[in-house]
Image (cartoon, rainbow, N blue to C red):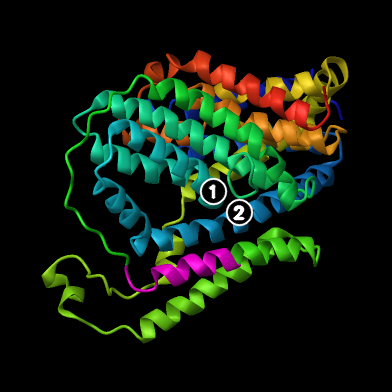
Amino acid sequence: MDLTQSWVGFSALTIFVTGYLLVVSEEFTHLRKSKAMILAAGIIWAIIGIQYAQAGEPHAVEAAIREFLVEFAELFLFLLAAMTYVNAMSERNVFEALRSWLVRRRLTYRVLFWVTGILGFLLSPLIDNLTTALVMSGVVLAVGRDNPRFVSLSCINIVVAANAGGAFSPFGDITTLMVWQAGILPFWTFFDLFVPSLINFLLPAAAMSLALGNGRPEVSTDLVVMRRGARRIIFLFGCTVATAVSFHHFLHLPPFLGMMTGLAYLKFFGYYLRRTHIVTAADRPEYGQPGDVAPFDSFEQVARAEWDTLLFFFGVIMCVGGLGFIGYLAGLSEYMYLELGATIANTLVGVLSAFVDNIPVMVAVLQMDPQMDAAQWLLVTLTAGVGGSMLSIGSAAGVALMGQARGVYTFFGHLRWMPVIGLAYAASILVHLLMNGLL
């Protein structure tokens, strides 16, 4: 049934927009984003169910919901494994040790600006753009507490770098992960976006670095040592990524199965760490925080996963799925990809993701399923990934850093550099089109 002109369609659109306005205003309302989207998803499918039940076709709605549930379940299990590894590395002080090492170097503000940006660009393909932004912002806040301008510019640079780095890797962003898991592009094809992504990072970074002086922050003597097993957990994470890629490439199995298999590596290693742990005075509560040899519990790291984020994805996939089931996505796809053309449509996707987070935008594109070649799918992956850098609210990394560096990294501070970031966005698209013969 086409319900786009019925009360069901108008009601569903109103509910989705209201829910997403609550998501965008999370910083002010302090209402977790998952709550609004889960409620919106339930109401949207309920009114669809009412209409179909009255028409005598209730099973059509049930079948559609189960199809979207499978899509979410694959994404959920993949991210759960990845988040658990990141939490395990955090618990073993991997990221704190990196922060401590950088803080203790006698580097100028300008050099630190470039180091944190480059590390953000290189780490994002491995541990996702949000985690990378949080890790690098910790470094910036530690060394620049007396220099608000350095913190503000570095946070903008980190957001751009993390989003650009995440765009050329299936593990770097939720949008790239969804495209890879859908089987649209092979794993190694994403790396064709490396040069456009690099340009997207370097152009704004070069402009912003000119606004920084060559002063030096005070050197910190803070020394953080990684806990026992940290390096082996990093190695196991690499093995997990290799397992997921191998399962998908050679065995044609869903990538999430490889990630869950890799999660078992961590759990068995965690069992080994606990069995071989030697209790010391530092492990006793009366002596304060656990010492460097604290026992490792893999289930604690599972519990520390970003459940708000995971449940938000559930709400988004179900909401957008409901709008697609009503018929809105088919009409939008026909207008964008048939009338405007794939290149213009995919460029607009990136602009839209600056205002509306790239996740629902990419979910909508995947459910539209436009007929495009690999170069155009790479283009929409690039634009959805880096388009959010134009505004601080356009990506999870930007929203997270506004909370992390509250009052220093702001919406309007980021907005001042939007023309340069927008120029880099256009340049990265142009380079991709030239490299892949679309121009």
Is residue 15 visible to the viewer in this orientation of the structure?
no
Label 2 with label 1: CB-CB less than 8 Å = yes
Could you tell me the amino acid type at mark 2? Phe
Residue 432 vs 273, above or below: the answer is above
User: Magenta includes 228?
Assistant: yes
Instruction: Give 55 or 200, whichever is nearer the viewer.
Output: 200
- Give the x, y percent position of residue 158: 43, 35
Query: Residue 272: horizontal and vertical position, in percent?
Result: 43, 83
Residue 246 occupies which quadrant of the picture?
bottom right
Numbered label attached to residue 76: 2
What label sits on residue 14 in the rendered view?
none
- Dividing the image into 4 quarters, which one contains the C terminus? top right
Q: In this view, does 272 lie above or below 15?
A: below
On-image quarter of the N terminus: top right
Q: Name the residue under label 1.
A: 310
Q: Is disc 2 placed on a helix, strand or loop?
A: helix
Q: How crowded is mark 1: few (under 14 residues within 10 Å), some or many (20 or more)?
A: some
Density class for disc 2 (Cα within 10 Å; few <14, some 14-19, many ≥20) is: some
Magenta segment's dominant SS is: helix
Q: Quadrant of residue 415?
A: top left
Depth check, front residue: 100 or 72: 100
Say whether residue 231 is visible. Answer: yes
Q: In which quarter of the view is residue 240 placed?
A: bottom right
Q: How far apart are marks 2 and 1 (CA)?
A: 6 Å
Stretch of the chain drawn in magenta: 227-239
Q: What residue type is labelled 1?
A: Leu
> Is residue 234 rendered magenta in the image?
yes
